[in-house]
Image (tube, rainbow, N blue to C red):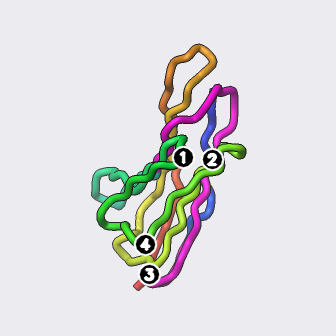
Amino acid sequence: QVQLVESGGGLVKTGGSLRLSCAASGSMFSINVMVWYRQAPGKQRELVARITSGGSTNYADSVKGRFTISRDNAKNTVYLQMNSLKPEDTAVYYCNAWVRSWDSYEYEYWGQGTQVTVSS
C-alpha cells in the first residue's frame, strides 16, 4: 500500500506564494505520473499540473506562468510552487500519483488534500 501525504497549504494574501509538497511512502517499484488537482467549493475537481517520471510537465491554462511543478525522484516527492496567488486559486489541493507496484501493475493513489486560501 502507498500513502501520499501533502503539506504546505495555508492562508496567504493575493500576490503571495506557497509551496506544496507531497511525499509518497510504502512499497512500490516506481512512480510514474504525479499530478496536482484542486477542488474549489461547488466546483468540479480540476487538474492543475502534472509531471512525468522523466520531468515533462503540463499545466492548466489558469496557472501557467505562476505555478511550477517539480519532483525529487530520490525522495518520492512532488512539489508545487505557487506564485502570484489569486483568490480564485482558493481550493483544496490534492496530490495524485500513478504507482507501478512490484506485480507490474499500475495503481492510482490520492492524498488527503491540503487547503489553500488566498485572501483579497
Q: Is residue 7 left or right of residue 13?
A: right
Query: Mark 4 and mark 3 in contact (Cβ < 8 Å)?
Result: no
- Callout 3–callout 1 Cβ contact below 8 Å: no
Q: Which residues are magenta?
A: 11-35
List x then y, in percent, for residue 65: 40, 71
Q: Mark 1 and 2 residues: CB-CB less than 8 Å, in contact?
A: yes
How many residues crowd around disc 2 within 10 Å: few (fewer than 14), some, or many (20 or more)?
some
Tell me the CA gap for discs 2 and 3: 25 Å
Look at label 4 and name its amino acid: Arg
Cα distance between the residues tagged 1 and 2: 7 Å
Residue 118 percent coordinates (x, y): 45, 76
Please report whichever mark, 2 or 4, sits nearer to the chain's N-terminal start: 2
Q: Earlier in the sequence, mark 1 or mark 4?
A: 4
Q: In front: mark 1 or mark 4?
A: 4
Q: Could you say which is closer to the camera, residue 71 or residue 26? A: 71
**Label 3: which residue?**
119
Residue that numbered label 1 is attached to: 112
Residue at mark 2: 5
Kindly identify the amino acid type of the residue bearing the numbered disc 1.
Gln
